[in-house]
Image (spheres, rainbow, N blue to C red):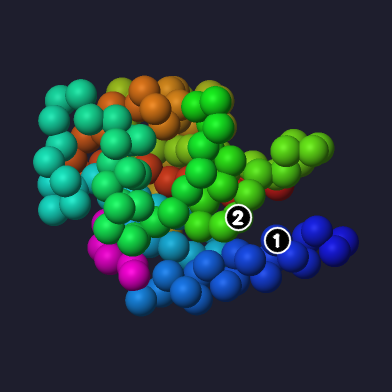
Amino acid sequence: MKRFVTLFVLLCLSVCFLCGCQSRYVTIDDSAIVIKASTAVMKIEKDTTLKEYMDALSESGRLSYEAKDGMIISINGVENDVVTWTASWMLYTNDPDNSNSAWGEAEYDGEVYGSAAWGYESLIIKEGYTYIWVYTVF
């Protein structure tokens, strides 16, 4: 219970702290981190990965994250539960070429997003598409 309360407080603090840093390219709320790919953040080439885009967001102070062995372990201070793996960040997108709804779906703001078919290091992003990190408790 103490771990849950700590996690909840960290999430709330992260949301409050980052409210001033939000833009239309990163939306942070109590259920998800929503990333909208836009050349206003960085030039998007035909092989730009979500990792590169997240690095640009991180460098500009819009987002913070940690990864280990190619896996996201923390976003904005909210960490995966690496002991029991009962909670972790899951990636979804509305890009039909890079998602698979059969692997799971997430709904955000009235739209359904399919589970990302690739990890963030190899997922090629596209201008105008949305990539959502959802902290999921199993």
Image check: 21 left or right of 80? Answer: left
Above-or-below relation of 31 to 90: below
CB under 8 Å between discs 2 and 1:
yes
Q: Amino acid at mark 1?
A: Leu
Residue on which disc 2 sits: 78
Q: Earlier in the sequence, mark 2 or mark 1?
A: 1
Relative image position of residue 84 (x, y in whole percent): 81, 37
Mark 1: secondary structure:
helix
Residue on which disc 1 sits: 7
Quadrant, the N terminus: bottom right
Residue 24 belongs to the span the image colors magenta: yes
Mark number displayed over residue 57: none
Relative image position of residue 44 (x, y in whole percent): 15, 37
The number of callouts visible is: 2
At x 49% / y 32%, what residue is drawn? 115
Q: Which residues are magenta?
A: 21-25
